[in-house]
Amino acid sequence: MSIPRLVVCLGNPGDKYRMTWHNAGFWVADILAREAGVHFINAGLFNAAVMPDGMDLIKPTVYMNRSGRAVAAFLDSRGYNPDELLVICDDINLELGRLRLRDTGSHGGHNGLRSIIDSLGTEAFPRLRLGIGPPPDRDDLADYVLDKVPERLEEEASVMAHNAADCVLLYANEGLSSAQERYNKKKDV
């Protein structure tokens, strides 16, 4: 497994979605870019930045369920293989704050991952899932992931996003297994 040459952070475009659970991937992208001192440039289907080490960082400008189109276009333009990709997204099946880094897997019901798998024709690419917890009983899934993060959970969500950014950097510098060993454990209480 190679180090990521492209980090794709999933979310929905527009201010209305900025602080929603489904935009957890965008939070990580913004942290990585800010800490590296780089800025995103709009390139049609995505906003792109190049990290100091040469790793590409993108946020698709299409809605979550169409992310695959943007990812496929970027991979094609750079000649990258899917295993050189790292996708970052939210996951309702993980408790809030928990991270899970895997080298392959199914979409697990996530429409952004489903779109990428469909567009690339493979599940064989790394992904980092950020736990947002399950929806409360009264909410359906679509409403929940598009809800704004409650103020009482903002700090925990921020810590998770910063941990995810650190995980990406460890993966890029020391490899997948090192990042998995450190970040796939249960979150600290």
Image: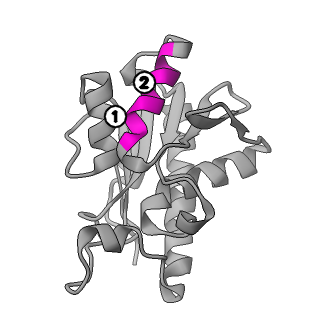
Q: Residue at x 40, y 51 (%)?
A: 89
Residue 70: in magenta span: yes
Front residue of this view, candidates 181 and 72: 72
Q: Residue at x 20, y 49 (%)?
A: 108
**What residue is shown with label 1?**
116
Q: What is the x, y in percent for residue 177?
A: 37, 36
Q: What is the x, y in percent for residue 101?
A: 35, 45
Residue 76 visible, this orientation: yes
Quadrant of residue 124 within the rendered picture: top left
User: Which kind of residue does numbered mark 1 sit on?
Assistant: Ile
Q: Circle 1 sits in a helix, a strand or a loop, which is it? A: helix
Give the spatial CA distance, label 2 vs label 1.
Answer: 8 Å
Front residue of this view, candidates 32 and 180: 32
User: Which kind of residue does numbered mark 2 sit on?
Assistant: Ala
Q: Residue at x 31, y 38 (%)?
A: 115
Dot 1: within a 10 Å radius of its alpha carbon, few (fewer than 14), some, or many (20 or more) residues? many
Q: Is residue 52 left or right of residue 14?
A: right
Q: Circle 2 sits in a helix, a strand or a loop, which is it? A: helix
**What residue is shown with label 2?**
72
- Do the residues bearing badges 2 and 1 touch, measured as CB atoms within 8 Å? yes
Q: What is the x, y in percent for residue 49?
A: 69, 35
Residue 103 visible, this orientation: no
Main secondary structure along the magenta-highlighted residues: helix
> Is 178 located above or below residue 158 in the figure?
above
Q: Is residue 135 left or right of residue 57?
A: left
Range of residues picked out in magenta: 66-76
Name the image quarter holding the N terminus: top left
Q: Is residue 71 left or right of residue 77?
A: left
> Is 34 located above or below residue 78 in the figure?
below
Q: Residue at x 53, y 29 (%)?
A: 6
Q: Earlier in the sequence, mark 2 or mark 1?
A: 2
Residue 132: in magenta span: no
